[in-house]
Amino acid sequence: ARKRRGRERMRSRKNQYEGGDALLAALKCELGVTPVVAVECTFAQDPAITLKEVRSLAKQVELSVVANRRAQVPLGLAMTGVAGQVAEIADGMGAKGWRISRHEGPVAASFPGRRVVVLSPDAANPLLPEGKTPLDPSAVYVIGGIVDRSV
């Protein structure tokens, strides 16, 4: 019975994902109805960045896509600055099948006219203090695409 319920739950998620919820989320993202979380990958074009670090970045993005797919209220996901070895490694990991928008240019060029909020683990103020409103659906929230294991 437990296995059956698990299979039914997986089938429901799969139907929900493939049946249009993901496409609807992507459309809402493009229209500015859903907040976008953009992973800025431009830094990875630096020659000092190792292949191991770029692979780690791609893996973190992949895990974010999976977590977002399972979320009750998915956000729009985007990768910006995707070119060169970042694109090559991500594509090798199956990134062309991920539900994420990809942009070669930086965030500002990829989302013109939208408010850009750069997130940092060192910020003095929390993003969503208690009692405050949720994320702004017309904004793009930027996460630097660097995997820092010390944070």
Image (spheres, rainbow, N blue to C red):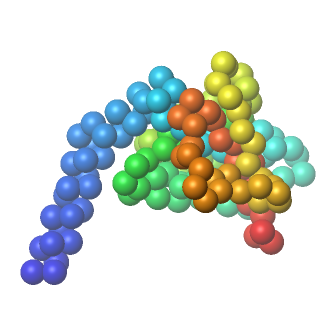
Classify residue 37 by image quadrant. top right
Q: Which residue is located at x 48 percent, y 44 percent?
A: 75
The quarter of the image holding the C terminus is bottom right
- Looking at the image, residue 80 lies above or below residue 15: above
Classify residue 129 by image quadrant. bottom right
Q: Is residue 150 left or right of residue 142?
A: right
Residue 139 screen position, x and y as percent: 61, 33
Identity of the residue furthest to the top in this view: 113
Residue 29 screen position, x and y as percent: 48, 31
The quarter of the image holding the N terminus is bottom left
Q: Which residue is located at x 66 percent, y 18 percent?
A: 113
Which one is nearer the viewer's eye here, 74 or 1?
A: 74
Q: Is residue 90 left or right of residue 19?
A: right
Q: Which residue is located at x 77 percent, y 59 percent?
A: 121
Which one is nearer the viewer's eye here, 57 or 121?
A: 121
Residue 122 seen by the camera: yes
Residue 25 screen position, x and y as percent: 40, 36
Residue 46 screen position, x and y as percent: 86, 44
Identity of the residue furthest to the left in this view: 1
Q: Which residue is located at x 84 percent, y 53 percent?
A: 49
Q: Is residue 135 left or right of residue 21?
A: right
